[in-house]
């Protein structure tokens, strides 16, 4: 039974259905509301691309689709990051929200609504939902006791009395504050009954099991307000209480489609919440409990996807392997990225991201696969039939298996739609590309270029090219949700005038391509690229991008991640570093033993520097200012734990610290007092 059906028979009325009837069934889906403590990376991009693919697919299945994405802007982490940046929380989170929205626009995945938790309509919705829960007896006042860091103005989760703050190392204090609590404990059995009646509510299965065992373990009441945070939605008439994490961002899905007036829009309940696996509990436990408490319809399904690992490692700033979308899109375009993410990663599981695999996939499936099939088919139709779809000859009992039998095509269509319905994108694409491969093989076996040489094979030639073009048309329609622009181009080149996005997949069948249709000029869709050159371009753009400063982020360790925190770990370049980062750099007093110029390099000197327990060879850009002989005997500051690297073929094992003047001239750091060689700097 679907959640909606059970709701109709149970306590939770289907208010969304009381609206005026729609011409088409509605389908409402959401991405997480991303936390504006940092900027989007490839993990967030993946969530949003998946939502966009579902949105386009559902439209082609006849649904009136609405997609919400947005930003979770409240909480202590934003408050602290704003403070570090010298901005008000509102200013800070607006700046970041704008960047998120701009990126989705740029990538063509904006959704229909970008809800911000700072929007007035969201505030109203949260306050309204709170009142409904309270009126129904599910809110109580109580006391929350936890370990608090006064310096960071934040609770430290899972700390005991006297434990140090993981951020600043200062001892935490035990603090008790008055909070409002949501009576989550009363929903254990109701939730278990609901999951049992709606076995597909939580997907995939592994996540469902995880949630079941969590709920079976018993539910504690949930603190939903704070008096120690300022940056949040005020609890009406209860200053200084503001709503805390859970009872804020989740509600954005409802605020986006009418909030208290959701009846009028007719979009609620959501058909699908797409989330990262780390936030499944909030969506599958807290959120339905809030809605039950407020007597509102429940979402129909929560789907959790996995994490993107980079070359099999978790992306993290400290590993320096955080992938962002712009350089990839700059080098290859958005569609290859969409295709790669959906084809390569089994939706719901963790997946590995690598540039090598991305470019390999591009060349094999897009350039040599679909792109090549489109170009050879259209080129031959232009050459042999003057750019008109030929009329296939009646069955000739040909010796090859044509891929284009009606049964075959219709079976494939049904199978592929079923895979899309199950959000099994990788297999759906695999199946579509099997057809691409079949048509390609068919062309190679039939050799239309040879048939074209004999007038008596004209009818056979027409059949072969009709079959290829019709196969291409069907493949193009099926791949449209993933490759919206490229498929539209091929579709137009096949002479189809109706926009591809308006085609209904249920009505698609073999033989609809009309002979005599004028085809367009064949043009390359996916040019083949050189792998190493493309990866080098992506990496160069990445470095360029990393030079532009990004908003600082506060460490998120001490407070629970908001429901909006997406997929992979939140990351951004911090303007300030903690002492532990500084402590990673080892610096020592060194003394220059010898110095000579590096042949062919005006600026470089090759030095032998004594750092106490060893003599290091270091290449330094000092030659325009310092003569080699003036440096011998001089004490310098050496960074001793840098990775060795080669400059002009000479290995450099360390770095000499110098000030850099505006014209780039170096001035060596030194000491006024005498210091022993090898002394450490702290
Ligand atoms: Zn602290």
Image: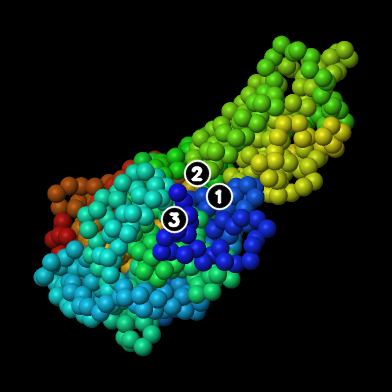
Residue that numbered label 1 is attached to? 54
Residue that numbered label 2 is attached to? 423
| Identity of the residue drawn at 56% across and 49% down | 53
| Identity of the residue drawn at 22% across and 58% down | 218
Give percent across and percent down for residue 107.
58, 55
Q: Is label 2 in a helix, a strand or a loop?
A: loop
Please indicate whether residue 6 sits to the left or right of residue 497 in the image: left
Mark 2 or mark 1, earlier in chain: 1
Numbered badge on residue 6: 3
Please report contact status of discs 2 and 1: CB closer than 8 Å, yes or no.
Answer: yes
Q: Residues within 10 Å of mark 2 (few under 14, many from 20)?
A: some
| Identity of the residue drawn at 27% across and 74% down | 181
Quarter placement of the C terminus: bottom left
Name the foreground residue: 586 vs 114.
114
Give the spatial CA distance, label 3 vs label 2. 23 Å
Q: Is label 1 in a helix, a strand or a loop?
A: helix
Q: Is label 3 in a helix, a strand or a loop?
A: helix
Please report contact status of discs 3 and 2: CB closer than 8 Å, yes or no.
Answer: no
Please report contact status of discs 3 and 1: CB closer than 8 Å, yes or no.
Answer: no
């Amino acid at each position: 039974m679907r959640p909606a059906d059970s709701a109709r028979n149970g306590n939770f009325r289907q208010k969304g259905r009381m609206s005026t009837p729609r011409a088409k069934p509605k389908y409402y889906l959401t991405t997480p509301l991303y936390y504006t403590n940092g900027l989007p990376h490839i993990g967030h991009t993946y969530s949003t691309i998946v939502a966009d693919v579902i949105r386009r697919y559902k439209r082609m299945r006849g649904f009136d689709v609405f997609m919400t994405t947005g930003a979770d802007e409240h909480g202590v982490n934003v408050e602290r990051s704003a403070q570090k940046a010298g901005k008000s929380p509102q200013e800070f989170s607006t700046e970041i929200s704008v960047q998120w929205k701009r990126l989705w626009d740029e990538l063509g995945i904006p959704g229909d609504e970008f809800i911000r938790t700072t929007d007035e309509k969201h505030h109203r919705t949260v306050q309204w939902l709170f009142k409904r829960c309270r009126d129904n007896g599910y809110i109580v006042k109580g006391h929350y006791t936890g370990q608090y860091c006064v310096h960071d103005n934040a609770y430290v989760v899972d700390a005991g009395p006297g434990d140090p703050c993981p951020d600043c190392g200062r001892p935490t204090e035990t603090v008790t504050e008055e909070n409002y609590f949501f009576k989550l404990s009363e929903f254990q059995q109701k939730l278990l009954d609901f999951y049992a009646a709606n076995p597909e509510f939580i997907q995939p299965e592994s996540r469902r099991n995880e949630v079941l065992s969590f709920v079976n373990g018993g539910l504690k009441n949930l603190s939903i307000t704070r008096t120690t945070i300022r940056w949040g939605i005020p609890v009406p008439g209860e200053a200084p209480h503001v709503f805390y994490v859970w009872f804020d961002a989740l509600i954005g899905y409802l605020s986006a489609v009418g909030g208290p007036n959701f009846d009028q829009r007719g979009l609620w309940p959501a058909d699908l919440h797409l989330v990262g696996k780390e936030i499944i509990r909030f969506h599958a436990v807290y959120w339905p409990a809030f809605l039950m408490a407020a007597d509102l319809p429940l979402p129909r399904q929560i789907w959790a996807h996995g994490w993107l690992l980079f070359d099999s490692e978790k992306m993290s700033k400290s590993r320096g392997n955080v992938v962002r979308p712009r350089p990839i899109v700059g080098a290859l375009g958005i569609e290859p990225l969409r295709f790669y993410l959906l084809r390569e990663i089994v939706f719901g599981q963790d997946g590995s991201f690598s540039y090598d695999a991305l470019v390999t996939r591009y060349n094999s499936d897009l350039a040599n696969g679909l792109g090549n099939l489109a170009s050879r088919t259209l080129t031959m139709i232009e050459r042999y039939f003057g750019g008109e779809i030929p009329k296939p000859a009646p069955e000739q009992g040909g010796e090859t298996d044509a891929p284009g039998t009606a049964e075959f095509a219709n079976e494939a269509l049904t199978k592929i739609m079923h895979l899309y319905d199950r959000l099994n994108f990788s297999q759906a694409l695999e199946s579509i590309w099997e057809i691409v491969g079949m048509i390609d093989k068919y062309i190679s076996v039939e050799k239309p270029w040879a048939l074209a040489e004999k007038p008596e094979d004209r009818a056979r030639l027409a059949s072969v090219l009709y079959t290829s073009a019709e196969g291409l048309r069907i493949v193009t329609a099926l791949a449209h949700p993933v490759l919206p622009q490229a498929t539209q181009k091929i579709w137009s080149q096949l002479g189809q005038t109706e926009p591809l996005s308006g085609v209904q997949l249920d009505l698609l069948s073999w033989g609809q391509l009309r002979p005599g249709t004028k085809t367009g000029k064949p043009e390359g869709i996916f040019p083949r690229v050189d792998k190493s050159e493309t990866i080098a371009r992506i990496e160069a753009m990445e470095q360029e991008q990393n030079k532009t400063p990004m908003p600082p982020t506060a460490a998120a360790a001490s407070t629970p991640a908001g429901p909006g925190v997406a997929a992979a770990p939140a990351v951004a370049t911090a303007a300030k570093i903690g002492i532990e980062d500084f402590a990673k750099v080892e610096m020592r007093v060194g003394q220059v033993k010898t110095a000579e110029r590096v042949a062919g390099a005006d600026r470089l000197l090759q030095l032998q520097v004594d750092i106490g327990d060893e003599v290091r060879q270091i290449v330094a850009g000092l030659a325009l200012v310092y003569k080699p002989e003036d440096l011998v005997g001089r004490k310098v500051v050496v960074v001793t734990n840098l990775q060795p690297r080669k400059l002009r073929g000479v290995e450099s094992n360390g770095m000499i610290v110098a000030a850099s003047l505006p014209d780039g001239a170096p001035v060596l750091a030194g000491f006024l007092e005498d210091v022993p060689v090898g002394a450490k700097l702290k």
